[in-house]
Image: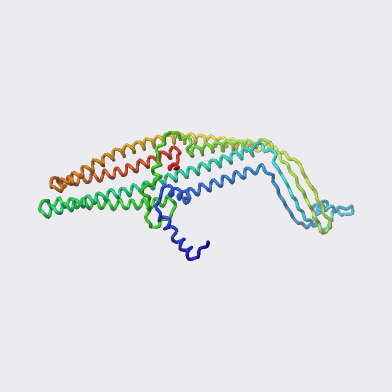
Amino acid sequence: MSLSPGLLSLLIIAGPVGLFAAPWTLDRAVATALENSPDARVARARVEGAQAYVEQAGAAWMPQLSVSGRYTDTNSPMMAFGSILNQRAFSFGLDFNHPGRIDSLNATGTVAYNLYSGGRATAGRTAARAGADAAGHDLRTAQQQLATEVVKAVLNLRKAREAVTAVEGGVQAYEAAVTAASARFDAGQLLKSDLLSLQVQLAQTRENLSAAKHGAALAGLAFQYVLGLEPTGVPVELVEDDPALARLATPDTRDFSQRPELLGLQARVRAAGAMTEVARGAHRPTVNAFASYQYDQGWKTDRHGDSWLAGLSVDVNLFDGGQTSGKIRQGNAELTQVKEMLRKATLGIGLEVEQARLAHADAAERLAVSASAVEQAEESARLSRARFEKEALLTADLIGVESRLLEARLRRTIAGADERLALVELRRALGLEPLPQP
């Protein structure tokens, strides 16, 4: 089925808007970020480059075939005499000093194969494969970090919007209080100063609501940025009950040995060791086999001929001014550096895991405390409103009760999001996927 140009243009224009039309799930957001994010694309390009290097290293086990051709026309005695011999046109009447102009069309095919390279080919292939493994672990690291940032962006957006809802509840409560206070003031049962106090508190809460909405808008932009999408002005819509959030479970292990950063450094240790072996191979002989076939045609002699050549070559580096020894020392130094980088990373990640575990435990405890505080604040506010309507509670006391309720709700909202965020960080620190597979 083909699309008309007009319909195709319409789909292109409406594409970005359509992308935001459906509510976002965590799984869809992560998949979009892994596809569109520049970080993920850079990591994938590095993997492709590393795989290409493996292919280059594997070429050492393949024969090398080359074909060359050239046409010459000369009166140089040496070159002309060589062409005459190759064309099988020699005669004893030839004047060696003045052979005349001789042309030659030469075609040569050569096959070469390395029989032994002092272990450099094997070590080079080992280093290339280790480098490819390291690039793969780097890609996994980038994907995990990106997925973590996506989950955190979604949770921050939810937290910002829940904060807006909590402040809106406070605005509604103060609006109801101002309405009741106005009725009492009109009846002569409330002082003007008390009514003004409630109105001022309502204005401040509305100001807080405006700031909360601004924060939610910024969280929406941050969500689009993490996904690698251009802002479209369309509000980000999240699904209400995302099943992926239910899959966020607390890990029952402290083992971080599968952290991709560590696996990548381990691969780099193998690569550095192999590169040291490549340097040592320069002290060993190199053995190559070769064979070639040559065809020569001359039009001035009206003769042609062919020949072949085959043999073995052995090259031994007896002295290179210390260049190979220097490369070996350099390789050993780089190997030591990578090993120490691995040890440092292991220690740092161990500390990171403990920090993430304690942060999650603290966030879970704060969530439990804040949930209990909200229940108490809501009951206190309900009783206080009833007493205020019956003229049994001062305005200042009602303001204090409503402020404490609003603060308790905000604390619970922040604590709930922080607990999820801390859990995501804990899973990342352990090298686990931020979102377990269903």
Toward the right, the furthest residue is 93
Residue drawn 20% across and 45% down?
382
The quadrant of the rendering that contains the C terminus is: top left
Instruction: State the image coordinates of residue 211 (x, y, percent, origin top left).
Output: 29, 51
**Vertical position of residue 59 compared to residue 284: above or below:** below
Q: Nearer the viewer, residue 320 or 128?
A: 128
Which color mode does the image show? rainbow
In the image, taking residue 73 as reference, residue 362 lies left or right, namely left
Q: Position of residue 140 (x, y in %)?
A: 49, 43
Asked whether 341 or 401 is in front, the reply is 401
In screen coordinates, is 249 left or right of 66? left
434 lies above or below 202: above
- Which residue extends farthest front? 1
Q: Is residue 217 left or right of residue 431?
A: left
Q: Quadrant of residue 59?
A: top right
In the rendered image, the residue lying farthest to the left is 188
Q: How many marks?
A: 0
**Which image quarter: residue 69?**
bottom right
Tell me the residue at 15%/50% (across/down). Answer: 194
Q: Is residue 308 left or right of residue 340?
A: right
Q: Position of residue 9 (x, y in %)?
A: 47, 63
Name the residue rendered at 45%, 63% in the picture.
10
